[in-house]
Structure formats: C-alpha cells, structure tokens
Image (cartoon, rainbow, N blue to C red):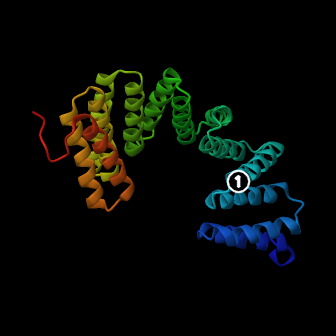
Amino acid sequence: MKLDKSPFVIISVIGQELLAAGYHASSLVVLESALKIGTCSLKLRGSVFSALSSAHWGLGNTDQAIGFMQQDLAVAKSLGDQVGECRAHGNLGAAYFSKGSYKEALTHHRFQLVLAMKQKDRTVAASALSSLGHVYSAIGDYPNALASHKQCVLLAKQLSDKQFEAREIGNVGAVFLALGEASNALDCHKEHLEIAQELENKHEEARAYSNLGSAFHYKREFKQAIQYHSKVLNISKHLGDRAIEARACAGLGHAARVTGLGPSQELS
C-alpha cells in the first residue's frame, strides 16, 4: 500500500484507532490533521468524514456531526456506494431525531429503508423501520408508527433475533397504548416479558414490566401498576442500573400521586 508514502492514510488510521478506543477529542485533532494533508481518493476522504462525524457525535457536537455526515453522504453518492449511502442516511436520521427535526429524520430513514431493501439487507431494513416507528410516534402519526414497528417485528422474526423481536413487540404495545387500545397493548407487553424471561435478559424484563405498569395505569388499575413498577425497581437494584431505577421511581411516583399510596401499601 506504500504507507510510508501516504501520510494521509497513516494519520487517518491513527485517528480512527483513537476513535475506536473512545478517545473522541484526540481522534478529532488527528482526523482533522489528515484532512488538512488531503488525498485524491474520494473513498479515503469519505471514511475520514464518517469518522469525524462519529467523533463529534461522541462529544455531543450534534451540528458538527451532521455536517460531516452530509459530506460522507455526498461522497458515497458520488462513488455510487449504496452501502455507504445507506449508512449515512441512517446516521443523519438518528442525528436529526435527536434534535427534534422530525421531518428531516423521516426523510433520511425512508431513504435508508429503500436502500436497505434494494440491497436485501434485512438487518438494516429492520433498523430503519424501528427508527421510522419512533419518528412517527414522536409526531403523533400512530397508524404509521404501528405499521412500521409491526413490519420490524416480522423482520426480527425472520432474522431470528429474539431480543430485537422482544423490544419491537414492546414498541408495538407502546403505540397501541397511545392509540387507547390498552388490551392490545397488554398482550404485546406480556409477550415482550415472556421472551425477555426466556432469554434471561433482565434489562428487557425491566422494560416489559415498566410498560405493563404504564398500561395498567392507563386502565386505572393502580394496584397492578404499582406491583409492576415495583418489580422494575427490584431489578434496577439487582443490576445497579440507575437509569432503570429512575424509570421505576417515575412510574411509582405517578401511581402514588394518583392513589396516595406507596409501593408497600395496599389499595382498599
């Protein structure tokens, strides 16, 4: 490869190694240095744009990350690299979603889905459908959110990815609840719980219990809601996971505010 005569390659490789090791700030300096040196290879430049977008994303610099994602996309298009184009659309969709720019997020995830289907890449297609479901939910378009998550469940089953399937069934349940269809939501969350227990995945189990608590709260069956949120709290303590603990406390607090009871008390 004549690496001794290609300082751009050497420096960009070092930058990407730093990025892979989690040194985002250091990788940024090195990768930017590689760009200053320059290269005639569009493909190599595109790989640096992609790495820079990841470095900025890791540092929380969303706007800068989006800028490099767009440059990465432009390079992939010019090279006719549909795999790279699909990846860039997925990254842009996620970035715009994080900013609350849902119109742009929809556009990029739709392109991601189309390209993934052209390549017959069911894993990426499933990821795009899941992302589309979340964007549709965020804008209140629940019928499209439901359709997207249901299609994703079908693909997850085809891929034999039980954890992904369980999570997507939970997402279907969440949309059903948003539509006011509590019985369908409960069916989904119970199925999510069964798969999580079968996999012995405590994080998914906690997520399913939390969703069940929310569904029973919607049905105004507060005693059962408290029982499920208490299960989430117990799992969070077992795992030492503060994020799950916070979710459990939020659910318990919501139920206690309505009933005036805590998790250790009984409804009359």
**Residue drawn 35% across the image and 59% down it:** 241
The image quadrant of residue 239 is: bottom left
**Residue drawn 37% across the image and 58% down it:** 242
Residue at the far left in the pictured view: 268
Circle 1 residue: 65
Say left or right for 162 vs 193: right
Q: Amino acid at mark 1?
A: Ala
Q: Does residue 132 sit above or below 20 in this rendering?
A: above
Residue at the far bottom in the pictured view: 4
Residue 63 locus on image (x, y percent): 72, 50
Residue 76 locus on image (x, y percent): 77, 46
Residue 264 locus on image (x, y percent): 15, 47
Q: Does residue 268 sit above or below 235 in this rendering?
A: above
The quadrant of the picture occupied by the N terminus is bottom right
**Residue drawn 79% across the image and 69% down it:** 9
**Residue drawn 31% across the image and 24% down it:** 182
Residue at the far right in the pictured view: 40
Which structural element holds mark 1?
helix
Q: Is residue 172 visible?
A: yes
Say left or right for 117 vs 204: right
The image quadrant of residue 195 is: top left
